[in-house]
Amino acid sequence: MMSDPEIEGECSDLFNLTHQYDEYIFCIYNDVDSGIPLEEVIPAGFVYVFTLLLGVVGNALVIFCIVRHKGMRSITNIFLLSLATADLMLVLICVPVKGIAFFSFSWTTGKVMCKLVHYVQNVSMICSVMTLTMMSIERYVAIRYPLKAKYLCTLVHAKVVIFSVWSLSFILAVPILFGQKLVEGGVLQKGYTCIKEWSDPIYKELYELYMLIIMLIIPTGVMIVAYTGICWEMITVTARRADMRSGSLSETTPPSEKMDQTRKGVFKGNRKSSSQTKTKKKSVEDDKTKMQVVKMLVVVVFLFVLCWAPILINNVLVGFNILPLLHYGSLKPMRMTFHLLSYFNSCINPVVYSFMSRNFRESFKQTFRNLCCGKKPLAEGNTRYTRVGTMSFATRTTSVNRSRKYQNRTDSDKVDQSNSSSDNVKITLAPPNYEDVEAS
């Protein structure tokens, strides 16, 4: 059934006079026989299906790897576990329902789902951005104040922070329950739609401004300050250590102190040089590891802002009547892109981890090998992880038989004995000079 041009004209006048989207859309509502244009169906359908599959598989894999392997339970990874849980919740509940609504022209899942889907969406959004913000603060404290971090940045404190983040997210998302409503209407054909409808226009403006502040302005400001401070600290420390290695600091040393150091070096230099070299190498590798973690987190934050900022800004402009609610001209494909982009963010993080974290990459490979091939190249009982800062590196332990010869010496004689035994030889996948601290 196609809409009557006269009725549609009257509806257009109605919208121009009242600027009420729901009155206009229900005045001309119909399930048009021609359906959605093919150029909209194909890309939208592909993105919905791709987001659903990649989001479920990727985030479930992240959760499994962190929960399954004890060596993966670093502070940063615990935060990433929370982030993956929020993304998985959004993908499982919101994406299928929103996809059905997009292709059916009408909200067919009822009043409860109308409120629940948008509430869960807001909980996931708020939880994700708060988790990213807490991660930036934790990294800042760990790198800027390493001594304080020893008792502040612990797994117990991280779990408490995550619990608080989730609790606060469920509270901050409550306003949408009062604004999201299922409305019935239509002249040519009855239908339902799930829209934000407030009792007073001022509430609409306040709500959109509220979401922009807690989702974008405050978190982005905090993360910019934190990561700027982290980068500056890392650059300063790296430059200072480079100067020390090049000997530039020794140029300012008085001659008398240089002579004392030279005399001491005659007796102690050879013995200390080896340990000092190892310490310097370990410091350099530690700095590289920390910087790699920071780079990965900055990319995750950048993608979150890139994916959610457009739709949040659009909602504010519509809420203040700066942009029309109807999809005129290029507004339709643009807003469709904004919505799909926001959902796409929930499945992109596992891809980032795979490219930027060797630990996650190796854990993903091991999990796929176990699931697909039934092989367990790294037995759980023999898997070790090297953790420096917040990064963990997998190591392998394998058993080999070899002959070992040792001597037992007494005051009267020397006895040579041979013994064949099974020793554990560790093959480390991490860079050299790392220290094993935990076995899973």
Image (cartoon, rainbow, N blue to C red):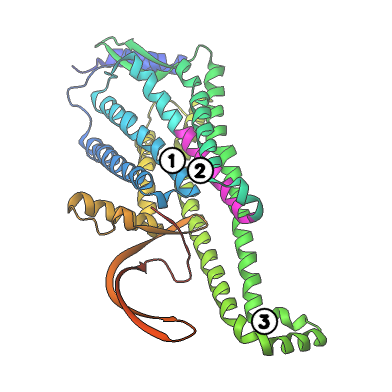
Q: Relative to residue 167, is residue 404 depicted above or below? A: below
Q: Which mark is residue 132?
A: 2
**Residue at which label 3 appears:** 247
Residue density around tag 3, few if under 14, some if 14–19, many if 20 or more, within 10 Å: few
Query: Closer to the camera, 227 or 39?
Result: 227
Q: Relative to residue 44, is residue 169 depicted above or below? A: above
Query: Closer to the camera, 348 or 212?
Result: 348
Q: Residue at x 18, y 51 (%)?
A: 372
Residue 142 part of the magenta-drawn span: yes
Q: Residue at x 41, y 66 (%)?
A: 430
Q: Where does the magenta region start and end?
A: 125-146
Q: Which mark is residue 83?
A: 1
Q: CA distance from mark 1 to mark 3?
A: 45 Å
Work out whether mark 1 precedes mark 3 in sequence or the reverse, and give the earlier one. 1
Determine whether, in the image, residue 114 is placed left or right of residue 215.
left
Query: Closer to the camera, 14 or 356?
Result: 356
Residue 392 occupies quadrant: bottom left
Q: CA distance from mark 1 to mark 2?
A: 8 Å
Q: Amino acid at mark 3?
A: Gly
Q: Amino acid at mark 2?
A: Leu
Residue density around tag 2, few if under 14, some if 14–19, many if 20 or more, within 10 Å: many
Tag in front: 2 or 3: 3
Q: CA distance from mark 2 to mark 3?
A: 40 Å
Q: Residue at x 45, y 18 (%)?
A: 177
Determine whether, in the image, residue 252 is placed left or right of residue 104.
right
**Residue 193, position as x, y percentages in the image:** 33, 17
Q: Residue at x 43, y 69 (%)?
A: 431
Q: Relative to residue 109, is residue 49 depicted above or below? A: below
Q: Are marks 1 and 2 in contact (CB under 8 Å)?
A: yes
Q: Amino acid at mark 1?
A: Leu
